Amino acid sequence: MILAGLRSLDSVSGSSYYGQLMEKIQAGSSEFITGRDSILIDLSSWYRDSLAPKIEIIQDAIGDRHLIRFRYYAPSGESERTVEPYYLVFRWSNWYLWGWCLSRKDFRLFKLNRMDNVHGTDKTFDCREASVPDLSNEKIFPGEIKVKALFETDQKWRLVEEFGPSCFTENDDGRLLFTANHTDIENLVTWIMTFGDKAELLEPIEAREKISSMVQKMTKVYKEAEHGGI
């Protein structure tokens, strides 16, 4: 398991440092190589080229206790941030930075894929009491929105993949009645829209109305395009 973890870090490090370290460990004892050495982990996803430089800059800044600066893209808009970096976190299939944001005067979790122009500074900082962040789903994504939706049966694979086989019951007409808790209306609307006409959101009403409004606007846009609107 240790070897698998070391091997996985090279997928985002931009170097072969961990692979070389693993070779030294293996050379010291052939007992490390067993039939159980069968786990391959790639932490880079689709974004290795952009992730590796960011991770290297952040790692250096954490080690040197230097502030970092970057442009951050969030649903609320774009902003320039200066941050005391404390932890690089791989969670929910993505990489994040946990640090103290000087503009927000609080600890924040920043998604690396939303960070641009990441660069270190020569300004040092004194470490705060930065315990390992509580990144439980309940803490970061409190499920306060009760969701109920109907899905066509050919979408069962996706519901099982994302929420597990107990997230729905089968209606008499074959459709799947899905129930869950969600954290954000906008995110919920976006997710439901990815199913196209294979899903119907029943609750909450606010999100259902947003989808109805979006569909009407999209219909207008595409009808205008058909008639030479673009």
Image (cartoon, rainbow, N blue to C red):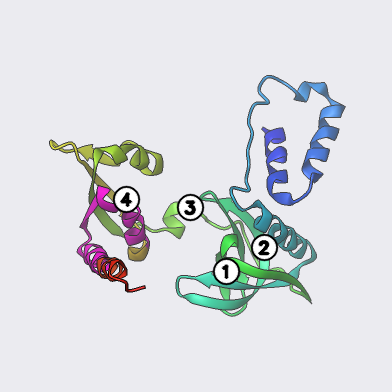
Q: Earlier in the sequence, mark 4 or mark 1?
A: 1
> Pointer 4: what residue?
195
Question: On the rendered structure, is 88 left or right of 137?
Answer: right
Q: Secondary structure at mark 3?
A: loop
The answer for how far apart the CA atoms under marks 2 and 3 are is: 18 Å
Q: Looking at the image, which is closer to me, 28 or 94?
A: 94
The answer to whether marks 3 and 1 mark residues whose Cβ atoms lie closer than 8 Å is no
Q: Are marks 3 and 4 in contact (CB under 8 Å)?
A: no
Mark 4 secondary-structure assignment = loop
The kind of residue on which mark 4 rests is Phe
At 69% across and 45% down in the image, what residue appears?
11
- Looking at the image, is mark 3 or mark 4 nearer the viewer? 4
The answer to whether marks 1 and 2 mark residues whose Cβ atoms lie closer than 8 Å is yes
Marks 3 and 1 sit apart, C-alpha to C-alpha, by 16 Å
Q: Which residue is mark 2?
A: 86
Residue at image location 71% in from the left, 38% down from the top: 7
